[in-house]
Image: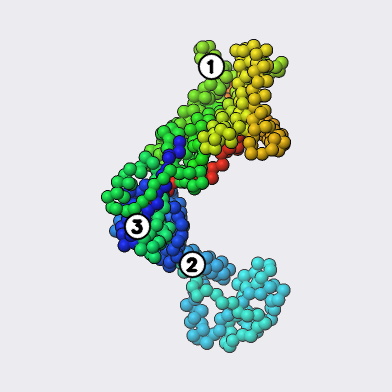
Amino acid sequence: MITKMKKLTFLVYHKEYEMFLERIRELGVVHVVEKQWGEMDDSLQLILRKQTLYKGVLQSMFLLADKQPDEHVHSELAPDALVQQYEDLKNRIQSLNQQASVLDKEIDQMEVWGDFDWEVVRKLEAAGWHVQFYACPKKDYDTAWEEEHNAIIVGDDGNLIRFVTVTCSPVALDIDPLRLPARNLSELKAGKAENEKALRQADEDLKQFCKANYATLKEGESKLYGEIDWMKVKLSSEEVAEGAVALLEGWVPADQEEELKKYLDESGVYYESRNATREDDVPVKLKNNAFTRMYEVLTKMYGMPSFTDFDPTPIVAPFFSLFFAFCMGDAGYGLILILLGFLLKKKLGKEMAGMMNLVITLGIFTTVFGAFLGTFFGMSLIDSDLPQNLKNFIIAGNVELFGSTYDKQMILALGIGVVHISIAMTVKAINSTVFYGFKESLSAWGWWLFIVGGVVVGTLSFLSIIPAEVSKWAFIAVAGVGAVGIYLLNNLRRNVLVNIGAGLWDTYNMASGLLGDTLSYIRLFALGLAGGMLGQTFNNLALMVVDGTEGVSAVFGWIGFGLIILVGHTLNIAMSCLSAFVHPLRLTFVEYFKNAGYQGKGLQYKPFKK
């Protein structure tokens, strides 16, 4: 549900303004309306740049710490100093990598000349001999150089000839001599080994630094956000009475208003309080029970409800869980999700506890619903030795409808879709009535009566609860009354002919949209069927490996059986989880939100606090 909000307007004497803001921040209940009345000074711009820097460094540190940084905060360390240390360590690694690249290049250059001693070359030069190194294409090599300049061929790869000249005076050939590294091959290789050792140590130093100091820098980032909020709030106040008074606007949840008013009355700050109106851009705070609260993350992924909407989360929670379980379709996989959720909850700590609770909940739904669908790790429960009274609860096999045969699970998926869309249309009609009045909602109620009423009448007739003759007149009645709202009363301020035209256009959109929306729910059946068949295939492959094996071959057969079962079902669980998240999300965001009229353009409540 959406918490009721009150709008507050404050008038504060300018000398008491900062003390007032500090107290408001301590209370942490006021969502300040941001209006940039003042100029953004250099200090705020500097903090915003620092915030961007911290964010980038923290992302890198988290990955370098293997996503498991220490939680201890070193309060004596300054965040800026940590960033500088991080940059120094990164620069050290970058410098070592550059040195490694240069060493590799020099080693490649020296390997063709062999591991000679440069000291010998320098002694020859000191004795008056000139030693020069050359490389040229084979076709350009002149054998006369061997006599004229004491050319000695060192290497010939068929394309390039490398040679050395040893002469009493400098040689002037048509090609330029080579400039070789100042160290011999052994020294270069020793340098490379030392560089690799230093690089490993630098990588380890950086990893340990990130692990030990991530939480400290994260704390620094949080304080930085506090400073940014403080400055934004200061800029959001308007100076009135020639700067003597600051005017500030904000929103506070109605259930927390009394505490704030108590402080305001004691401090003597002038304020006005009023209820929200339809014209206000009201921040939204969701308030749900423990079960529903886990699914608020899905609502926020699409967008927060506006103040004139209903919170969709109480409807999203059970249906998303049901859709997820249907797509997974295997009770055994649900048990794996429950176990995985508990293990990760213990390992990842408090920050991920909410998400892991969601995984556990989805696992419970999958286990229960998977049992009703009759699948356990790809095995059919309907074909097992379970007691018949338990098998009666399994939804499997076909059913005769209107002279044709249909799969029971497919009919179930479509039935769930019809219920889901009917609830969406009900929510839309009620929401429109609550926030815009009944007269403005006659079209929505007309469509609700026509669609939902028709579904109810059809269901009662199909179940033989009401006779066919009664159902016929009941359908005529709901269709007739609904048509009045759809075609004649959809807008009381327009001409009747315009209303009829608008109603016909709505009819076209509704007829084409509802059929597609309803058929979309077949994906629940299709994905559950695909996962079950794939699990069964892995089981059959594993059984084929051990079928007919004896003795030693049986040992290897059972090893193969275990590998196929482990790898196959792990792969199937991963793919099924992906599908079971994406497609229910689509059914929620597209089919449900569209028919419920939900837009998700609300502003999230973010109180000014430390």
In this view, the residue in front, 93 or 187, is: 93
Q: Residues within 10 Å of mark 1 (few under 14, many from 20)?
A: few
1 or 3: tag closer to the N-terminus = 3
Mark 2 or 3: in front is 3
Q: CA distance from mark 1 to mark 3?
A: 68 Å
The image position of residue 407, as x and y in percent, is 64, 21
Q: Who's the residue at 35% across and 42% down the image?
A: 256
In this view, the residue in front, 446 or 32, is: 446
Q: Who's the residue at 35% across and 63% down the image?
A: 244
The image position of residue 224, as x and y in percent, is 39, 57
In this view, the residue in front, 92 or 576, is: 576
2 or 3: tag closer to the N-terminus = 3
Check disc 1 and report its element: helix, strand or loop.
Answer: loop
Residue 610 falls left or right of residue 559: left
- Location of mark 3 (residue): 12
- In the picture, the disc for residue 210 is none
Residue 426: quadrant of the picture: top right
